[in-house]
Image: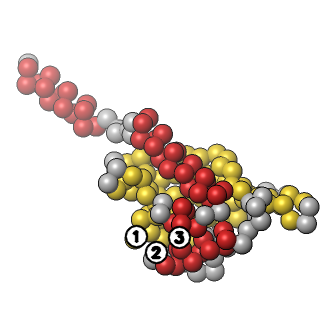
Amino acid sequence: MKNILYFIAVAILFSAPTYASAGSKEEVAAATQAWVKAMNSHNQEQVVVLYSPDAVLWGTRSPSLRDNPAAIKDYFKILQTVDPSYKVVIGEQRIRVYGDMAINTGTYTFSEIRDGKETNRPSRFSFVYRKQDGRWLIVDHHSSALPEPPK
């Protein structure tokens, strides 16, 4: 009887889905907020250090895939020329953590004042993170403009 109970307990344990701890999700949310803060500082270097050396970026304004540190840094040089009002605000997000990998999918809005008018560019994103040396670093980032809703 003990053996049967043991096997049932083991079967339940191995068939139960694994969930990330709330702490891991909070860490990934904080890593995403660090990206927002770096973008809002308009400091290219602060943004680039959040990416793993093997990261890939498909930026909203990029006609090409950025797949090395120099290309990613080049993409963010735009931060040196944006209006001081330029900012990013996170909208909804869905964070999933799978061990040392995590995915955060959601929306953000880029905005700035141009010619006295605020312009907004609603966009969507997917960040894939890998935990390296205790830090969640971006290994894949896709961003694209949010399409207009169907009429």
Q: Residue at x 48, y 60 (%)?
A: 50
The number of numbered discs placed on residues in the rendered structure image is 3
Return the mark for residue 63. Answer: none
Q: Secondary structure at mark 1?
A: strand
Return the mark for residue 53. Answer: 1
Looking at the picture, the colour scheme in use is: secondary structure
Q: Provide the residue designation for mark 2.
A: 69
In primary-sequence order, the first of circles 2 and 3 is 3
**In this rendering, is residue 53 above or below 135?**
below
Q: Residue at x 14, y 22 (%)?
A: 5
Which quarter of the figure has residue 111? bottom right
From the viewer's perspective, is 84 left or right of 66? right
User: Of tags 2 and 3, which is closer to the observer?
Assistant: 2
**In this rendering, is residue 2 above or below 35?**
above
Q: Provide the residue designation for mark 3.
A: 57
Q: Residues within 10 Å of mark 3 (few under 14, many from 20)?
A: many
**In this rendering, is residue 143 above or below 14?**
below
Q: Residue at x 46, y 74 (%)?
A: 69
Quarter of the image where the N terminus is located: top left
From the viewer's perspective, is 31 left or right of 4? right
How far, Cα to Cα, is label 2 from label 3? 10 Å
